Image (cartoon, rainbow, N blue to C red):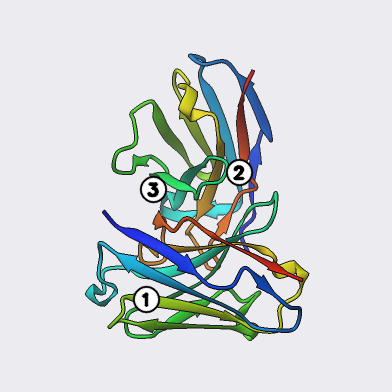
Amino acid sequence: QVQLQESGPRLVQPSQTLSLTCTVSGDSISSGNYYWSWVRQHPEKGLEWIGYIYHTGSTWYNPSLESRLTMSVDTSRNQFSLSLRSVTAADTAVYYCTRDMRSRWFDFWGQGSPVIVS
Amino acid sequence: DIVLTQSPGTLSLSPGEGATLSCRASQSLTGSYLAWYQQKPGQAPRLLIFGASTRATGIPDRFSGSGSGTDFTLTINRLEPEDFAVYYCQQYDSSPRTFGQGTKVEIK
């Protein structure tokens, strides 16, 4: 069974950088069969796709976040990561890492990592 | 960006009843590029439907999806206690992929 697990600080100060890592088990990022995405959910609000990365390191970001966003992948550890710079309170959300069916739907999700910017 | 509008915002129903959830897109989705997810409190969303009507692995057949163009529907036949949750639609017709704001199915 595919499992994803987010890790990272739960509290980030305004103007600092939010960094999260997703560890994948039950599938290999290196297989190249999927993309690997981040999705966030603001409190009591809907879902927002952040961006995806491929095992080659190719990325595609949501234009609304692109100027502050960097994603990376470590295939040796079967992990991918998110770095969001210059955060504000508006970045407070639960951040999910997901397995991405090649820019279509998200079929497996991590449990979510709540991040508060304060 | 494509805006997805879900209705109603909340649906109050009893176990055993049927539920009809709507998702309307701000522009036509070619190829019926729409997915549905279920989210329970404190949990991540779970994929239910992709391609507007194809159930994901392990999803009971009481869940069905239909629609094309701009209007899509998720139907839940004979609600089970575990079906009371929030449901989201998501389009993958164009980037950035976007989600609807959700419909909450609550116990009446």
Q: Which residue is mark 1?
A: A79
Kindly state the secondary structure of the residue where label 2 is placed.
strand
Helix, strand or loop at label 1? It is: strand
Q: CA distance from mark 3 to mark 2?
A: 15 Å
To which chain does the residue with label 1 belong? Answer: A
CB under 8 Å between discs 3 and 1: no
Q: Do circles 3 and 2 both sit on a common chain?
A: yes
Q: Of the numbered discs in the image, which one, if any, rests on residue B24? A: 2
Camera-side residue of A2 and B25: A2
Q: Residue at x 70, y 84 (%)?
A: A16
Q: Nearer the viewer, residue A9 or A111?
A: A9
Task: Look at mark 3 in the image and give the residue it sits on.
Answer: B51
Q: What amino acid does circle 3 point to?
A: Gly
Q: Residue B38 location in percent, x, y?
A: 49, 41
> Is residue A99 found left or right of B82 in the rendered image?
left
Give the mark toward the camera: 2 or 1: 1
Respond whether the residues carrying marks 3 and 1 are from the same subunit.
no
Query: How packed is label 3: few (under 14 Cα within 10 Å), some, or many (20 or more)?
Result: many
Crowd class of label 2 (few under 14; some 14 to 19; many from 20; radius 10 Å): many
In the image, residue B37 sits, relative to residue B30, either above or below, namely: above
Residue B57 percent location from the top left of the image: 29, 43
